[in-house]
Image (spheres, rainbow, N blue to C red):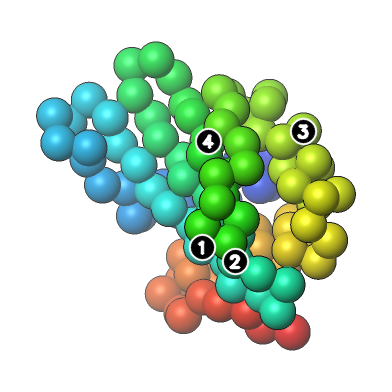
């Protein structure tokens, strides 16, 4: 799966699940992925400043980056520091497509 596919799937997920931060200028969507290796949470926020990603591992913030061009290197670092937690194909293809079709997401070996 390439970066354009990941971006397309995450953007579709964002459009389906986004919630306003209150003033309707900022919108966020959370993507949670639970695996035997821990919990990964991705927060995608869009506001007038741009697109921000907050990345959490086991409820701890490990990164915050602006823009898609910085998201992918940050996720490579998360994958290196937390082996088995971030599998791009599993998260965005198998589970992402399943969720967008209305099926339950979660760890599926």
- Residue behind mark 3: 73
Which mark identifies residue 32?
1
Q: Residues within 10 Å of mark 1 (few under 14, many from 20)?
A: some
- First along the sequence among labels 4 and 1: 1
> Is the Cβ of the residue at disc 2 closer than 8 Å to that at disc 4?
no
2 vs 3, front mark: 2
**Distance from Cα at disc 2 to Cα at disc 1:** 7 Å
**Distance from Cα at disc 4 to Cα at disc 1:** 13 Å
- First along the sequence among labels 2 and 3: 2
- Residue behind mark 2: 39
Q: Residue furthest bottom?
A: 109
Q: Residue furthest top?
A: 49
**Distance from Cα at disc 4 to Cα at disc 3:** 12 Å
> Is the Cβ of the residue at disc 4 closer than 8 Å to that at disc 3?
no
Give the image location of residue 2, x and y in percent: 78, 45
Q: Residues within 10 Å of mark 3 (few under 14, many from 20)?
A: few
**Distance from Cα at disc 2 to Cα at disc 3:** 19 Å
- Residue behind mark 4: 53
107 shown above or below 44: below
- For the point 62% across and 42% down, which residue is it? 62
């Amino acid at each position: 799966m390439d970066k354009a596919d990941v971006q397309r799937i995450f953007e579709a997920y964002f459009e389906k699940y986004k919630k306003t931060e209150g003033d309707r200028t900022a919108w966020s969507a959370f993507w949670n992925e639970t695996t035997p290796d821990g919990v990964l949470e991705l927060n995608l926020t869009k506001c007038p400043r741009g697109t921000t990603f907050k990345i959490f591992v086991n409820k701890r913030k490990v990164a915050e980056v602006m823009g898609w061009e910085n998201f992918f290197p940050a996720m490579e670092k998360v994958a290196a520091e937390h082996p088995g937690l971030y599998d791009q194909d599993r998260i965005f293809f198998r589970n992402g497509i399943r969720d967008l079709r209305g099926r339950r997401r979660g760890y599926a070996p």
